[in-house]
Amino acid sequence: MLEVVEFTDPMCPWAWGSEPTFQRLRELTGGRSRWRRVYGILFDLDDDPPPDPAAETAWYFRFVQQVSGHTGAPCPARLERVALSSWPASLGAKAAARQGAESAVLRKLREAMFLRGEPADTAERVLAAAAEVGGLDLDAFARDLDDPRIEAAVRADWLETRRPAAEVIGLTAPGPHCGAAKPIDGGLRYALPTLLFEGPLGREIVPGWRPLQQYLDAVERVAPA
């Protein structure tokens, strides 16, 4: 069995751009892998508010455009604001996993940000995004959003992301996003996205923006079967 851990965030433009590659990787590993997403909380609740929200939004929109230029992912025509927090969307994705709809809901949460420029950074916006997923029990989803166990699971993800493995600390590699651990809050966290592979022959970590072949090579090294 191949274990894959994906460190991600619904609001991360690099993760948005990596979606097609990760989807292809999931298809290729099929029933021979177990995939777990860890939500790293790119925009935290205790982040200081920007002194000039309009200037901050303009700067971040330019950054999203630059990332889109590297990844080829769609980019919104405008950005309403920098996300207030990653917590609501991360709770939503985690809650959707209870119905087997994590990938579908996560996709809609990202589309709100990266297609319409309207970050799903409140419970109301998360519910609106989830309503676009056919077959989802919205009443159960709304209850799960408020479930303390869902919050505890995302808090555990927050902690796991801030314990990066030695392989990515001080990492230097060609850009544009080599995936070195990021300094944050006096500590470090995994860059987003980062994939960690574990198999019979060991562990491999592939951080940052990488082509599909690098992930396939990592899989071959840890689980050649």
Image: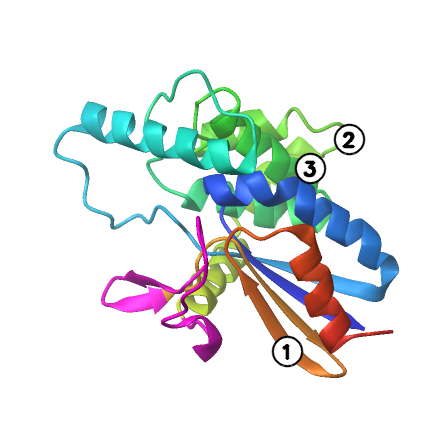
Q: Residue furthest toward the front? A: 174
| 3D distance between C-alphas at marks 2 and 3 | 11 Å
Nearer to me, 135 or 115: 115
Who's the residue at 68% across and 68% down the image? 218
In the image, is 20 to the left or to the right of 85? right
Q: Residues within 10 Å of mark 1 (few under 14, many from 20)?
A: some
Label 2 neighbour load within 10 Å: few <14, some 14-19, many 20+: few
Q: Amino acid at mark 2?
A: Gly
Callout in the foreground (2, 3): 3
Q: Which residues are magenta?
A: 163-188
Label 3 or label 1, whichever lies nearer to me, is 1
Q: Nearer the viewer, residue 127 or 202?
A: 202
- For badge 3, the amino acid type reads Ala
Q: Which residue is mark 2?
A: 135
Q: How is the image coloured?
A: rainbow
- Is 88 placed above or below 170 here? above
Q: Is residue 97 left or right of residue 65?
A: right
Cβ atoms under marks 1 and 2 closer than 8 Å:
no
Circle 1 — which element? strand
Residue 51 placed where, x, y %?
Answer: 12, 34
Q: Which residue is mark 1?
A: 203
**Residue 82 appearing in the image:** no
- Element assignment for label 3: helix
Say which of marks 1 and 2 sits in front. Answer: 1
Residue at the image position 32 percent from the left and 26 percent from the top: 81
> Residue drawn 57% across and 32% down?
72
